[in-house]
Amino acid sequence: MKILFDTNVILDVLLDRQPFSQPATQLMAMVTRAEISGYLCATTVTTIHYLLSRHLDCRQASAAIGTICDMFAIASVNQLVIKNALTNGFDDFEDAVLHEAATGVGAGAIVTRNGKDFTRATIPVFTPVELLAVLKSLN
C-alpha cells in the first residue's frame, strides 16, 4: 500500500517529539522493511530541511534528508498538482498540495496528525495510531 506521510509525522521521528514519535517510528520501520511504500511530498523535503537546519547544523540536516530520501519515494509537485490544489476546496494551500501529490502517485492513504486539515480529502486520511491499527487488521 502506498502511504504519503505528512511533514508532521516525519518531524515527530526526527525530532523525537513525544508522545507522537513511537507510532510514527513504527510506520517508518514498516517503510524500511518494505511492508508499505512510503512517499513524501516534494515540499515536505524542503520544509524538513529548513526546520532541521534550525536545530542542527546544515551538514546534519542534509544527512537527515539523505536518509529519508533513501527510505521514501518523492511525490512530485508539478503544474498539474498546483492547479488541482488551487481548486480542490482545501482551506490550507500546503495541505491541498500534499493531497494532490498523494493523488498523483496513487497513494492509498495519507498519514498525518492533522486530520482535520484534510476534511475534503478524496483518499483516506489516518493518524499514525489509526494507520497502524488498519495495517494490523489487514495482516
Image (cartoon, rainbow, N blue to C red):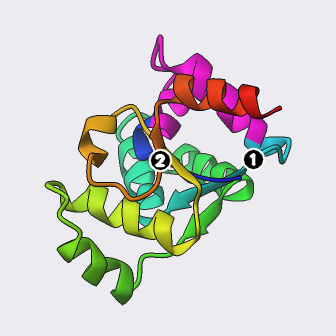
Q: Where is residue 44, by image quadrant?
A: bottom left
* Residue 112 against residue 136 in the figure, above or below: below
Which of the two labelled residues, at mark 1 and mark 2, occupies the earlier sequence position?
A: 1
Q: Amino acid at mark 2?
A: Pro
Residue ranking furthest to the top: 19
**Picture coordinates of residue 3, whole percent (x, y):** 60, 51
Q: Disc 2 marks which residue? A: 124
Q: Report the front residue among 62 and 111.
A: 111
Labels 1, 2: front one: 2
Question: What residue is drawn where x is 54% and y is 21%?
Answer: 21
Q: Where is residue 29, by image quadrant?
A: top right
Asked whether 38 falls inside the magenta stretch, the response is: no
Position of 133 with respect to 138 (left or right) is: left
Question: What residue is drawn where x is 19% and y is 58%?
Answer: 90
Contact check, label 1 and label 2, Cβ < 8 Å: no
Q: Amino acid at mark 1?
A: Ile
Position of 117 with respect to 21 (left or right) is: left
**Picture coordinates of residue 50, whole percent (x, y):** 37, 51
Q: For the stretch drawn in magenta, what is the main secondary structure? A: helix
Which disc, if any, is residue 36? 1
Q: Report the front residue among 16 and 129.
A: 129
Q: Report the front residue among 79 and 70.
A: 79
**Picture coordinates of residue 52, whole percent (x, y):** 43, 41
Q: Which residues are magenta?
A: 9-30
